[in-house]
Image: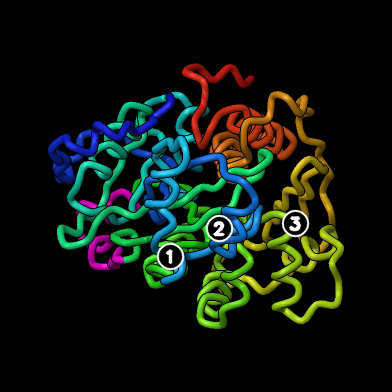
Amino acid sequence: AGCVVVPDSLRTPFTFQPNTNLTLKMAVLLGMGNPLLDISAVVPTEFLDKYDLKLNNAVLAEEKHAPMYDDMVKNFDVEYIAGGATQNSIRVAQWMLGAPKSAAYMGCVGKDAFADEMVKCCEAEGVHVNYMVDEATPTGTCGVLVNGGERSLCAALNAANNYKIAHLEKPENWKLVEDAKFYYSAGFFLTVSPDSMLKVAKHAAEQGKTYTMNLSAPFLMEVPPFKSAMMECMPYVDVLFGNESEAATFAKSEGWDTTDVKEIACKASTLPKAEGAKPGRLVVFTQGMDPTIVAKDGAVLGEFPVIPLAPEKLVDTNGAGDAFVGGFLSQFVKGAELEKCVKAGNYGANAIIQQSGCKFPPVCDFA
């Protein structure tokens, strides 16, 4: 389940066509997000400084980042890996669920070989991908700059930025929504199609299903239109994921005078829910190597330690948060106890940080 896209593949013809005659097993989990091809390389600190990038952060590419991708390819040993936060989580969830087509994914790609490779990757892993294809725009990419095992992400969304609610609303695509019982989007999708997120979130509330979302990156809470879109979805969010830096930024954006992760988790768990939505919100905040905090109804339900890893076994942290979500959801959709869900999240994250990028062993032996 490596899904490394080799440069030679860029010359292969595009063959993917959306499947409108779905006869497959219904996916219980549906993800919607920004499908990206990760261009990953180990780089020195000077390279991060050159492009004004910080470790353990994610940004959208600006004009100043335009030369960076070529710069990476020319000067470093790069690896091409299927990526995008939500797609990573869905791939990990599918890996841990095992039964083919248990998880499905939507997003927008270009009509090119990068997209073709991502389709092959996901289909080989058992994920049902249902991409919208924008023939005029190239598939999105994400620069993954690794330094000392930590990562900095810089995404050029390209086609991923062009997902439209019209694709979601087509009967054959909306059927995936109707068939699923659980939904997940990383916060990054708020910059692209917040109306799609809100439509699915409202469907989940109306049908007694479960909608889950990730804070994903500080900038989403620092840019007013993105924060506004996030808070429009929040009343429908049944499970909220994030890490300690995102939690701190969220608290600041809400005017909460605290940096205590447990307190922030408790406060976030009591934000208002929409009328008709399931009562309560589970908040799950990871903290790197420190224990994961889980809160609901204003109280901490538990602090769960991560799986220890010898420093020499750490390859890079890219995809660790995504993998935690995928692992957590793989058990959550089965109705497992909270402790087992977090344990599965830690298992997924532990597997991914021992690989370059979001890749995992062929067999999942989680029990």
- Distance in Å between CA atoms under marks 3 and 1: 24 Å
Q: Is residue 179 above or below residue 358?
A: below
Q: Give the label on residue 213, or none.
A: 2
Say which of 55 and 197 sits in front: 55
Instruction: Rate crowding at label 3 as few (under 14), some (14 to 19) or many (20 or more) other CA atoms within 10 Å.
Output: many
38 in relation to 257, above or below = above
Q: Mark 1 sits on what residue?
A: 197
Residue at x 38%, y 68% (from the top left corner): 193
Instruction: Give residue 165's position: percent from left, percent from top.
Output: 29, 67
Q: Which of the marked residues, 2 or 3, is nearer the chain's N terminus?
A: 2
Dot 1 falls on a residue whose secondary structure is helix
What residue sits 51% from the left and 20% below the top? 361
- Does the stretch in magenta take in 166? yes
**Number of the label disc, if any, that sits on residue 244:** 3
Find residue 231 and report its horizontal and vertical position in percent.
58, 75
**Crowdedness near tag 1: few (<14), some (14–19) or many (≥20) residues, C-alpha within 10 Å:** many
